[in-house]
Image: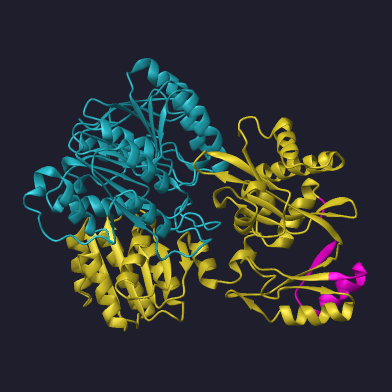
Chain colours: A yellow, B cyan
Amino acid sequence: MRLQEYQGKELFRRVGIPVADGKVALSAPEAEQIARELGGPVVVKAQVLVGGRGKAGGIKLARTPQEARAHAEAILSMTIKGERVRKVLVTKAVAIEREFYLSITIDRAAKKPIVIFSAEGGMEIEELAKTYPEKIIKFHIDPLIGLQSYQVRTALYQAGIAPSLMRSLSEIFFKLYQAFVQYHAQLVEINPLALADGKLIAVDSKFIIDDDDIPAELAGWEEEELAGSPEERAAKQAGLQYVKLDGTIGIIGNGAGLVMATLDVVALKGGRPANFLDIGGGASAEMMKKALQIVLSDPNVRGLFINIFGGITRCDEVARGLVAAQQELGIRVPMVVRLTGTNEAEGRKILEAQGITPVADMEEGAAEIVRKTS
Amino acid sequence: MSILINSNTKVLVQGITGSEGSFHTQRMREYGTQIVAGVTPGKGGSDFEGIPVYNTVAEAVKNHEIDASAIFVPAQFAADAIVEAADAGIKLIVCITEHIPVHQMLKVVQVVSQKGSRLIGPNCPGVISPGKSKVGILPNHVFKPGPVGIVSRSGTLTYEIADQLSRAGIGQSTVVGIGGDPIIGSSFIDILALFQKDRQTKAIVLVGEIGGTDEERAAEFISQHVTKPVVAYIAGFSAPPGKRMGHAGAIISGGEGTAQAKAQALEAHGIPVATTPHQIVELVRAVVPEREARSRTHLSLR
């Protein structure tokens, strides 16, 4: 689960990392009202999960409440990299003297959390790594004992941090690690971590929470991420793994790796996949029906490729779900079904009785659906 | 020979009375796996189809010689089950369970390695040495004994590739699903090292996918330590960044973990990468010695 900036800042507040006062607005008048309450200059920030919103014009400084209203009006009508802006964060403007970068993420190769710190902040970490590679400091945390003081000291000395800032920066490291652990995060990032009026303040937030371990106190927070895609929400409720893509061929398969391979083979044959959908191992006819409903609810879908390799999943079960869905939903787009493995003969019979002739080979199926939709 | 498991491997099933555990215990037995005991807390003293069930792993180990444990317990108890197996001294732990919290796994992998056990998974299909033994959920009918080792982050995709190979008359020495999670017990490198030493294995198929840098590190390792031919397939060229593609570990983040980068790294180290799962058969035919004679056909590499 990825959090919006304002949600992440709320979590920063809960662990004691300072953030500027601010509130979320859904409309321009609301933004004006918040700006008035805050007093003084404010920043109006698009709440989107994609990066690069500043460059896209999604962050604006407003000196008056009227100006905040005008900016909110403009930003709320924007779509940034395909993501429609639904909310803006109106926050007190701070006079930034200096910017740092601080994050904690999971180093998969080392199998440990890793802290990344830089005395230069404000730009994206990839850019930072290119511009100031020598200024990026990284160290691992032993998850059995957690972050240690000497590690933070070593990093701060290495970065040449002034003695006057050592203590307050060190505190932020520990509070960020607390947030990382407490909220079961895979990534927490403060960029920039700013020095303003002699105090440290988190000007932005980035959080990725483990989907398998969402803390009870964050129940319902995933709504923000799902708001943009009704299909993804429906899939989540049905317990299916679905990712919307921008093509026209709907894809359903069993097993994440197989579905990824299916997308690739369809693309290789010249088609454009509309989605990723994994019905999982041992899926029932009912699951298959739900999967079809979700894929077909996407108006861009002009064809359907179903790729089933029966291992634990039984081909006859999948075929029954497909037939039930066809009768109830009336599938109107061209469809190719690839069916092989456990109970293949029974599955084939069920489909053939309905006038569907399955193919046995995945490449052949991919080529056929591309032909039928182009 | 084979790696990790063979016909003598004595297996414990943790969660043997659960729906997954009981179903797959039967399938493993049909395959010839020696299942000597099971564990389900609260069911100690009973049996599952003649297999004695214990309350704890320690008790099972006291009464039986056990080489490997297969874990089928639900996600909320799985981290505990892995550590319990390691603490009882079981050397090979295969965890099938999906959705174990990453923060728990960070601690578990450290404890397991301190105890000297090897963990395969979690979120994996397990291990099969065709014709000898199976610890996991891989479908029995797909695999045939032979010279090719397969190591993969995926389940169904592995079955697909093994099936293609078997149909083409190319059997497998051992097939290892290492799991689709971001934190797993054994990486490609760990399994590649075992295949390199195994006499039955003449060639290796590596099946990777987006997320992390395990394939890149494997490429480096192969160029330095693996003399046997290796061919690869990578899934996820069409995956957008920032989206979890089914597996928790299959996500491109911060520009890292793209299929393109992985394929490039493998090819840069001389490892051919198939563009489709089917093409793996051609690539393997070209490198497995005993088949070489009848597979001198044109080969198109990426």
**Is residue A185 in view from this perspective?**
yes
Q: In which quarter of the image is the C terminus of chain A?
A: bottom left
Q: Nearer the viewer, residue B272 or B25?
A: B272
Left or right relative to A226: residue B148? left
- The magenta stretch spans which residues? A18-42
Q: Residue B70's quadrant in the figure? A: top left
Left or right relative to A11: residue B65? left
Residue A68 is one of the magenta-drawn residues: no
Residue A26 is one of the magenta-drawn residues: yes
Q: Residue A328's quadrant in the figure? A: bottom left
Q: Residue at x 27, y 51 (%)?
A: B159
**Is residue A29 in view from this perspective?**
no
Q: Residue at x 41, y 67 (%)?
A: A291
Q: Which residue is drawn at 25% across and 65% down?
A: A362
Left or right relative to A316: residue A96? right
Q: Quadrant of the N terminus of chain A?
A: bottom right
